[in-house]
Image (cartoon, rainbow, N blue to C red):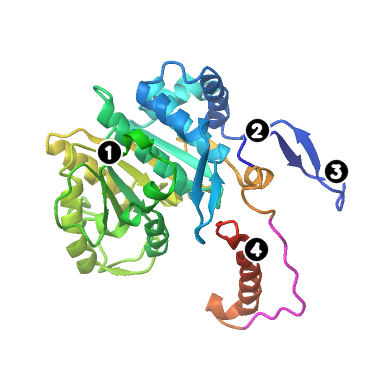
Amino acid sequence: PHEMPTHHRVRAEKEGDPAKKVKGRRTSDIIIAQNLRRYVTEWRETDYAGASDTTRELLHHWFGRDHAIKNNEGDVLPFKYYFCQREAIETFIYLKELRGLDTLSGIVSEFGGENSEIAALGIDPLEDQWSKYAFKVATGAGKTKIMSLAVVWSYFHSLRESYSPMTKHFVVIAPNITVFERLKEDFGDGFIFDKDPLIPVAWRGDWNLSVVLQDESTGAATGGTLYLTNIHRLYDTSKRRGKKDSETYDWMGPSVSKAKALDTGEELRERITSHKRVMVINDEAHHVWDPDSAWNEAIIYLNDTIKKRSGDGICSQLDFSATPKDNKGNIFKHVICDAPLGEAVDAGIVKSPIIGKGEKLIEQTSDDASVKYQQHLMMGYARWLRSKEEWEKSGKKAL
């Protein structure tokens, strides 16, 4: 399940016939992601020619050695990163380190296919203030693992390579409290960095990363820092350039009182902007499509404030989503890697979706969806409980 996909399924010719398996990988409709695959594959096959010593050591450690980790029951099981996770981090490093492509216009010009140079000229300079890379990754295919690989690579590159453009300071942003809590399971107390085989044993002594949650912004940390926060805590109304404000923030999640979010966010913003350089990682990043949104304004504020304090600003922005589209259904222009649901099913990473059928399903008359669709929801929940029991033995979550 972890190797490069070798086949894909196509629709059956007649309804009811089984789908045919066809040799070869699913072709991505995203031109840049599709074109990049060939270059990244060639680079991998040359044993990462031209990469720095730090990069080669980490890539060899992650993907060339055998690993084992403990599951939730304490059993030791073999561990291997999924191919989609490997391809995502390789693509990011290929563009950032090997090719030095730090702008969307540069990436479009190089990998955008026909008329790419004309398309590159049409990129708004505001989109090119710092390097942005988006990753289309199916739900359940391990976005958090890719984030952790990027954090470790940037940290050690910054530490070990002269004139590195990378950083030891990271801001991981969730769109709401639900996603924040999920990310806290992996990043809280640096759990994922201890559990997964991310850091070569000989380098452990050089690893010093403090994880700061949004409500723990006081105190100083030595070494590197990973800030995990809900977007609301980074939104500063005084920097909204004359935009109309409301008393609560209710976009992308439950309403949060303006006063509360500002009180708890001010010190967090102060700490983040005290660093010379940061990497921003956006989870569920389909919310960042609007350049005029509060989310994007918060990131621009971080970049501008760091620069004013004689720093370099944001060194990279990594956007993760299963559906990185704007409100018109257009895929983000900066998607560099495509790991769709179909490929995840082919590889055995996620199970084939099941269409459930229920008898006499009744919709209640209500504007509250939880009441209206109560029977549907309970049926889905019952099926999830069975999946949870089935998957628990392997240490995997049922999604």
- Residue 290 x/y as whole percent: 39, 48
Q: Which residue is mark 3?
A: 13
Q: Earlier in the sequence, mark 1 or mark 4?
A: 1
- Please state which of the two labelled residues, at mark 4 or mark 3, is closer to the viewer: 4
Helix, strand or loop at disc 4? helix
- Residue 81 x/y as whole percent: 53, 41
Question: On the picture, is 286 further left or further right than 165?
Answer: right
Q: Earlier in the sequence, mark 4 or mark 2?
A: 2
> Label 1 vs label 2: CA separation?
43 Å
> Label 4 vs label 2: CA separation?
32 Å
Q: Which residue is mark 1?
A: 205
Residue type pointed to by label 4 = Glu
Span highlighted in magenta in the image = 353-364
> Label 2 vs label 3: CA separation?
19 Å
> Label 3 vs label 1: CA separation?
58 Å
Helix, strand or loop at disc 1? helix
